[in-house]
Image: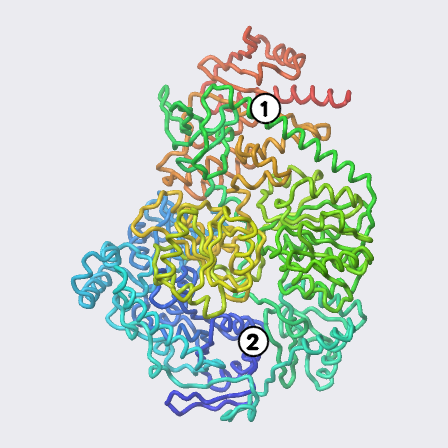
Amino acid sequence: MSLKKNENHSMNPILHGGVPEGYEPFVLEKLVREQKKSVLFILRDDRRMEEVKRVLSFFTPKLRVVEFPAWDCVPYDRVSPRADLMARRLETLTMIADGQLSEPFILLTTVNAILQRVPPKEVFKGVSLCLRRGDTFSSDKLIEFFASNGFLRVETVREQGEFAVRGGIMDLFSPGQDKPIRLDFFGDDIESIRSFDPMTQRSLETLESLTLKPASEVLESRKDISRFRSQYGELFGSKAANDPLYESVSAGKHFPGQEHWLPLFYQHMSTIFDYVPDACLIWDYQWEVAVQARLEQIQDHYEARVEFSKVEESTYRPLPSEYLYLKSDELLPGIAISPFAAGEEDSAPMDMGGRPIHAFSTARILAESRGEKRTLLEEVLKFCGEQIKEGRRVLMTALSDKSARRLQDLFKERDLAQLMPVGTFKDLMGLPQKSIGVTVLELEKGFLASNLCVLTEQDIFGERLIPLSRTKKQSADKLLEELSSFSEGDYVVHIQHGIGKYEGLETLQAGGTRHDCLKVLYDGDDKLFVPVENIDVLSRYGSEDTQVKLDRLGGAGWQMRKARVKKRIKEIADKLMKIAAERQLRKATAVSKPSGLYEEFCTRFPFPETDDQFRAIEETIEDIAKDVPMDRLICGDVGFGKTEVALRSAFVVAAMGKQVAIVVPTTLLCRQHFKSFKERFVGFGLRVEQISRLVTQTQVSKIKKEVEEGCVDILVATQGIFSKSTNFKNLGLLVVDEEQHFGVVQKERLKERYPNVHVLTLTATPIPRTLQMALTGVREMSLIATPPIDRLAVRTFVMPFDGMILREAILREQHRNGQVFYVCPRIQDLGAIKMKLSKIVPEAKVAMAHGQMPSRQLEDVMTGFYDGKYDVLLSTNIIESGIDIPTANTLIVHRADMWGLAQLYQLRGRVGRSKLRAYAYLTITAGKSLTKSAQKRLEVMQTLDGLGAGFSLASHDLDIRGAGNLVGEEQSGHVKEVGVELYQHMLQEAVHSLRETQTDEPIDEGLSPQINLGVSIMIPENYVSDLGLRMGLYRRLGHLKEPEAIQHFQEELQDRFGDVPEEVKNLLNVVHLKNLAVRAGVEKIDVGSKGVVIAFYKNMFDNPLGLVEFINDQKGTVKLRPDHKLGVLRAWASTEERMAGLESLLKRLGDFRKSEEKKHEAAN
């Protein structure tokens, strides 16, 4: 294999055949070795660039590889490219400009990236800034560097290109860094440089030095801004005067999407070819098609912008396309590669020796049609044997560790071959000649080379979904707890006083001390001030509903309502415990998975399982293997993989000769499940049927008869399955999907008819982990809170309503045969939006759906949309929570500022379920200023994916619908009466008290002791300036119960914000004392100059004899007053002594109280 150098300078690259996908590393290595030059490899798209990067790191790890991705927004867009993507581009440009890359290296880029002009090389030469620990560097100069190099100033740094200043601490996230960095200054001296976790904000490791690079291709020094103003004025004349882009840039502020006017900031622009003038150039297979499509898109978008500005009054003034984009005659020639061998294509003069592998799917279909279930793997093994005989090493690639293990098990169980795990290509070459290696490598198709055969999971089992890139999922609980703090105007519930409206944080002054309090408004304009350390008495009401009625302070209504709900909750908890106990006494058929066949069934799942999903499957299979009837609830958002749990359980039960019934609420869901079950069970000899209104009456009667005779293994049906005319011969598993749509009576009727059947319930209603914990052992529950790993992150844009962008979004879906969800917060908006859409995109077919439509009509609309009869579904919410429409990959949200965080997150989860990139446009009214909390919600939506956060927002921002469905439909009314968080707490306490014998923890409902120490208690504004963040910290602190957790919290504050002020230390100490007071049953503590007065909860102490002993021990310094309060004489000289003395007193009281409980338990 050798390579020809192209001496011809017309745009006709020399074609080199025999380079199938995956084989590129061997060609590139040879090219670098022979020509001793860097290589510019232009891939057709991002997916190909990611794949080539992965195979290069596996097969040729010694080659230096850098990448230059394209912007991820369309030409002439309203939004900026993603921050992390911009950072990757800038890191490459600055490294090349500064000569940091020793030749030769491989520069991977795409057609879209190469067609866009870039700032000239000299702009980035020497612009990087190196800081070392111990350096003296003015923080003002550093802020100036950030401002002129495209960094954005924020309160909390979470994404690349951001910086924050808090006194002597500066946080930043620079391109080229994996983690954000925290600089600690003493004056102008850099005392420490630490990396930190963007989720928890805690420091990770200490660094000696740091290199800062520009964060934007738009550099905004005074000179650059002046140049922009002058060139913009020349191009657009007097129109520039009232232009928001012009005004924003002139004021030195970042304007969303300003990068689309990039050439106006520079005297001239360059190309990537200018950055690597001597590099050997390689064009990917089908590069011409990609170039042509992109050039047409650029021109179409430019013309559309110009046209649109004539129709609608628009301040968007597009630059002529040649300013920012190359023309086809500016592209340079080189080598073009093709997977086909020389001779298979005309003009393929060179053959590089690689060959694509033809998938085994054809052999599989033939084998399955003959009913030969094991032929596929034997066929694969036979093929591998032939390759080994011809002297090739054989490597199988899997998409995940689980897939790799499953491949090994499949071959081992059939005594076919032992697959040897390898971590590197070197490991593979070190195996004995006849061994077959297996590794985790995300590669779509395999290939053959002279000494190597690579087989992918997709080659063997057919279609798999491969991710664009994989980010490690992190837990975002802390981040969300801070973000879900109370905002002004939120409805809150005080455990003693009921529903009020939070009006903000106020600092009260008394006796020379300052105390932060939460101001809550009640009916009749009454105000209640809750000290921040008692924030735990407040919980979120949980609904954005404006019809909420406020309670009256001191009124009896709240206490009556709470008592009524508490009584009802206790009955429910009793009932649940009783059902769970009865279930343990019944017998069911224990079913275990058929080895071998089950693994093969699992391999047909085209995604790697998430940890949550894998756990849910394992728990369900374990339950079925017991001889006690299962009753498990699987909670997970749409598309999170609940159906796979049902499929695998159904397979296990049906393969052992038992019948399976799947009950769904709608005809559409019935069709969807029938289709997926039918496809997955092909070739296993199991019969799947459906009953719904789409099946004729004659067929229904026939199917029912066959079900009764046991000829049907799996039946998918709507509510008709509850009728007495449907009888099963040998029912083993009942799967109820979307349980909230069925009445409790219907489900109980089926359970009564088949009391010994395993029941698996699936629901998309969000259920918080706290509630799951509360019901452990009462109702078995699995939570799938992580979205599938292989979903492409949904690209989210927050922008003013822009008809042209929305037209483009809808047409893009039409062009790729996709569909659009257009969601509005109010029914009354639907008509006006439908008219607007008919003007903007007359060619799109729009269907309208909302909750007030008759159910049959609604189902017909949804079925029509599912069948592709409409391009856009305009609705108030995605009505069918369980519906999965993989072709719908664009979401447009009208007035996104009116939605809650959890609602937006769930809506966005409706798109992005296929190989295609999904888009979410969160639109707001142009020119309308948003509330701070709405702005924060929208910012979070944009940043969550960048953080790689896989979680359910339900536990932090649940609305009223949620928890009620868990314990029956009728409960949602009770949730409405007390608010969602308090409802959960009450349910948890009810279950807890029923199990009280198993624990020594006392239950003091709503006890939040008040402690008056006469010291300032607050987080000062000059310590944490952002109000929302301060509230989030208060809320987190309110939930801390252990001294270690409070200590960690203090360390985190020190780390994030600098030295902890005295007022904050007082706050932390009071929270610790409060926890000790709860344990001691103390309700209030008042400290004066001569001592302290302690009031017990409900004026009672659980251990009166112990209290007498405690008083006697204190030798006359403690006495019990007539009002049942405890008076303690103490003369503490300082605040520290006061804290230590109180801690000692409360610990003693707590120990006395505990000893009485232990005696009481022993007597029982």
Q: Residue at x 23, y 61 (%)?
A: 225
Q: Nearer the viewer, mark 1 or mark 2?
A: 1
- Report which quarter residue 256 is drawn in: bottom left
Q: Please give the residue where the numbered disc 1 appears in the rendered image.
A: 563
Please name the residue that numbered disc 2 is placed on: 60
Q: In screen coordinates, is 435 left or right of 1038?
A: right
Give x and y (percent) for residue 80: 36, 61
- Quarter of image, res 410: bottom right
Quadrant the C terminus occupies: top right
Name above or below for residue 168 compared with residue 34: above
- Horizontal and vertical percent for residue 521? 41, 27
| Badge 1 element | helix
Q: Quadrant of the N terminus?
A: bottom right
Please tell me how crowded label 1 is: few (under 14), some (14-19), or many (20+) other residues with Cα within 10 Å.
few
Dot 2: element: loop
Classify 1003 as above or below 239.
above
Q: How is the image coloured?
A: rainbow
Q: What percent of the width, then of the height, locates residue 30?
A: 53, 84
Residue 1005 image offset from top left, x and y in percent: 59, 25
